[in-house]
Amino acid sequence: MRTQIIQVPYDSGYKDYRMGRGPGHIVRHLKAEKNFPVDEVEVHDRFALEVGTSFAVARQLAEKVCNVAGSGAFPLVLAGGCISCVGTLAGLGAPPPAIIWLDAHGDFNTPETTISGFLDGMGLATAVGRCWGKPRSHCPRLPPSAREGRRSWWAHASSMSMSVRCSTVPPFV
């Protein structure tokens, strides 16, 4: 199977900023080893906004993932932010894939439970439909949310805030 790299160099709605620089670094080193095809998400917002631009990135990523998967290739998404999972899942479409969340943080906060307000701290919660319903609904082909009968599991999330741990009940285990 052919692999197609999709580079998402965004963090908090800003291109090539903080964690958004990571995908480019990985791509440069991969290309030194083998010439993998690389496509990049690029959003042209006059005013970058954390929430608005992040969901614009998710929509564009969804289209790229859908096109790559539809061609029979494997879409390898290299992203600088956890909210990119929304675009990846939307691009894969139905049937909804399983989510294996490997991160130092649970990323299961919502606007109501977060202390920092950091959007990437809400990545998994957004992906499973726990928050950001309106912007999430504008991502084409996003699979049904956990609240619509799907289950989400994590093995361990050591730095999950107490408010999230206390408010999380099955099927969010």
Image (cartoon, helix red, strand yellow):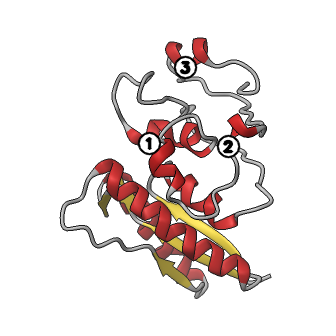
- Residue visible at 58% across and 88% down in the picture: 35
The x, y position of residue 171, in whole percent, is 76, 27
Q: Which amino acid type is marked by label 2? A: Ser
> Is label 2 in a helix, a strand or a loop?
loop
The answer to which image quadrant residue 1 occupies is: bottom right
Q: How many residues crowd around disc 3 within 10 Å: few (fewer than 14), some, or many (20 or more)? A: some
Q: Which amino acid type is marked by label 1? A: Asp
> Which one is closest to the eye, mark 1 or mark 2?
2
> Which one is closest to the eye, mark 3 or mark 2?
2
**Marks 3/2: CA–CA distance:** 18 Å
- Viewer-side residue, 54 vs 134: 134
The answer to which image quadrant residue 77 occupies is: bottom right
Along the horizontal axis of the image, is 31 left or right of 155?
left
> Is label 3 in a helix, a strand or a loop?
helix
Q: How many residues crowd around disc 2 within 10 Å: few (fewer than 14), some, or many (20 or more)? A: some
The x, y position of residue 47, in whole percent, is 19, 61
Earlier sequence position, callout 1 versus callout 2: 1
> Is label 1 in a helix, a strand or a loop?
helix
The x, y position of residue 135, in whole percent, is 45, 50
- Residue visible at 54% across and 64% down in the picture: 78
Residue holding disc 2: 145
Q: Is residue 167 visible?
A: yes
Residue holding disc 3: 164
- Viewer-side residue, 4 vs 99: 99
**Marks 3/1: CA–CA distance:** 15 Å
The x, y position of residue 15, in whole percent, is 31, 64
Q: Which amino acid type is marked by label 3? A: Val
Residue holding disc 1: 120
